Image (spheres, grey):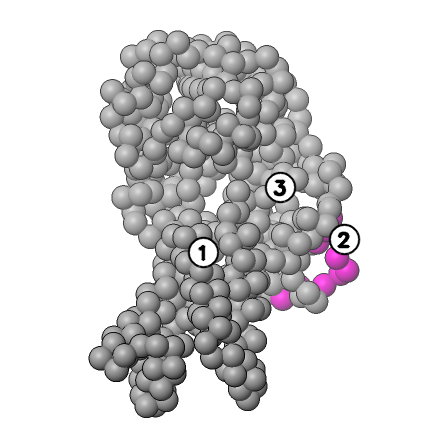
Amino acid sequence: MKILVTGATGFIATQMITDLIAAGHQVTCCVRDTRYAERLFPQATVIRCDFLNDITAEQWLPRVQGIDVVINCVGILYHPNKKVIWAVHHDTPRALFDASVAAGVKKIIHISALAVDKSAVEYAKSKKAIDDYLLTLPIKAVILRPSFVYAKGSYGGSSLFRGLAGLPWIIPVPGKGEQTFQPLHNEDLAKAVLRLIEQPLSNSIILNAVGPTRVPLKDVLTTLRNWLGFPKAMLLFIPLRLIGLGARAGDLIPYSALNSSSIKMLSQNNIATDEATQQFHEHIGFVPRDFSAGVFSHPSSVQDRWHARLFFLKPALQLSLAFVWLFTAFTSAFFIPKAAAYHILAQLGNPASWQPLCLYGASAIHGILGLALLFSYQLKKVGTLQIGIMISYTALITLLLPHLWIEPFGAMAKTLPLIVATLILLALASDR
């Protein structure tokens, strides 16, 4: 079959596409970053789409011509701008689904979420709205609502759980840790989709895509810690209200895994009824692995342990580097004696008339770069520019003012680890 997959480079879709290609299907990956997708799936056709802006059926119609099945895997848990959430979850999928009807697509498989009919956050409301709309269309559709999807790799909420499980000595547990999930391995979800593609439908259906066992959050975390090979740790139960205060900082960061919406959804059970669980298993023709069996079906590696331990160190590194740039901007502009600053600028060849402009201009640049780093704006470009600035003034001082290297406490020597720290941050910038 000819199958178009949106969100093709995402956590859920990558396994699905790999299995679809292995099964002999012709896959079209619809993504924003086409070069990355082409490297990831050399056997697939890759076309560009933009779920923030492609909100008309006319834009999607050429893409779905000749397609048998459309699989929509696009989703974001949180963004500070509600319009972005609704564009990604509702406006653009609606255009895609309308175009699919017009082009004669035979079936749509849409990945939703189990909590959409129980939560009032924008993520759930926008997902529920498009689910309801899809059911009104004259096209056979399967809406899959997973509880918690996990895999050998991780992204978003599963990365957060690994980060919590990988902390030294303690495992912070939101609330009492009794919030319950029905975890489903990504490989089993992909296997289910392959079977649903071939399965004839008399009408559109909603299936709760869940595993066979209900697992409390505290057991999810301890199982992950055991899988990572870390020694036992004490569970530290943290009130959800207290976590909510920290999540407000995450509300300022687009696509943050820790935010008020995720905490609200985390505070409730995310399980299906026994009848709905059995219905899903009967439709797909097999019983997925339970959580423990699924987790231990692939051994953890040193890379998994690195990722878990770096999960919270990455934002700490980013905040500390932002602090350095903002602190130097503030102190240079307001606290360093102007005579001393102008003396250094004169030694670097700046005429007196240019010295105030150089001092306050450099302070402003430091401040802008610090703010950009703080709010993750164009992180790779900002980090690269910071490295370029540090290398440039290190080289300039080495050539013209080498005595500054042996100033008390060796301030210049600290530039070198800052460059390396920024390189590490850039290496960790992409979490896909």
> Which SS class for mark 2?
loop
Q: Which amino acid type is shown beneath numbered disc 2?
A: Gly
> Which SS class for mark 3?
loop
Residues at marks 3 and 1 touching, judged by CB atoms closer than 8 Å: no
| Location of residue 143 with respect to 66 vertically, above or below | below
- Give the image location of residue 180, x and y in percent: 58, 47
Residue beneath label 3, please? 153
Range shown magenta:
225-236
Q: How far apart are labels 3 and 2 at the CA level?
A: 16 Å
Residue in view at x 41 percent, y 58 percent? 385
Q: Quadrant of residue 7?
A: top left
- Give the image location of residue 41, x and y in percent: 55, 26
Residue in view at x 59 percent, y 44 percent? 154
Q: How far apart are labels 3 and 1 at the CA level?
A: 28 Å
Residue 384's disc is: 1
Res. 316 in view: no
Q: Earlier in the sequence, mark 2 or mark 1?
A: 2
Q: How far apart are labels 2 and 1 at the CA level?
A: 35 Å
Residue beneath label 2, please? 229
Residue in view at x 74 percent, y 36 percent? 297
